[in-house]
Amino acid sequence: MPSRLSPGELCCLLERCRANDAIAWEHLTAWVTARGHAVLSGVATISRADREDVIADALKNLITVVRHGGIRGTSNAEIDGYVCMAIRNRALNLIRGRARRRDAGEMTTRPLGDGSVGSDPPDGALSQDAQAIAADLLERAEKVLLSWPAADRYLFIAKLNGVSAKTIRATLEGPPFESSAAVTTVDTRFHRLRRRLVHELEDP
């Protein structure tokens, strides 16, 4: 698929997949794989092999969801948001599962009260506590984003993924958003939304 999507292209692609169009499934798989690598590129706690597993798991689940028409929304932004969240959720499950297994291993192999701290994490790797904190923050951030209006959610996620303000403005002006905004307003809204997210994450 081309890197730039035309309006409604993903919705049409899903419809073709539901009609058992083999070429459409190939295009969807390629697009989800590319989005998966983009979404997970900044997650330092999982390896490239882990990313491949996460993407494969997300694809397996998405096949069922697509066939049953389970993806809400018809715009490229809404469908992209659903797919990216599905990928992040599976990465989060991987991180949590790994942390639980490590904790269980420590409880069964480390004598109680021996005062040992275990081996240090590899250079560049997060400690188990840091991983748990990161996983919790990711989950809370997703809940906050889901509570926002669709236009704000799209603008924020698009900016995080490097989409230009001009492209974001053009998308917001079309369906389903139908919201006009200047390029400078896009940047202002993004910074305001980022402060709002930080504020809500800081609340107990």
Image (cartoon, rainbow, N blue to C red):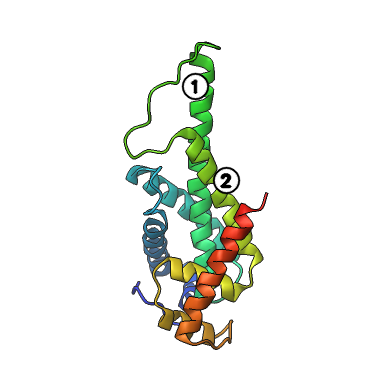
Callout 2 environment at 10 Å: few (<14), some (14 to 19), or many (20+)?
A: few
Residue 21: x %, y % from top left? 44, 69
Question: Residue at the location (51% across, 35% down)?
Answer: 129
**Residue 125, x across and y down, in percent:** 37, 38
Q: Which residue is mark 2?
A: 136
Up the image or down, 153 lies above or below 101; here it is below
Up-down: is 2 above or below 117?
A: below
Label 1, secondary structure: give it. helix
Query: Which of disc 1 and disc 2 is earlier in sequence?
Result: 1
Q: Which mark is residue 105?
A: 1
Mark on residue 161? Answer: none
Quarter of the figure with the N terminus: bottom left
SS of the residue at dot 2? helix
Q: Is residue 11 visible in this depiction of the protein? A: no
Residue drawn at (58%, 61%) of the image? 197
Estimate the x, y position of residue 102 in percent, counting from the top left. 48, 27
The reply, left or right, for residue 67 in relation to residue 54 is right
Query: 44 and 191: which one is in front?
Result: 191
Residue at the image point whose x is 50% and y is 61% from the top = 83
Q: Is residue 150 visible?
A: yes
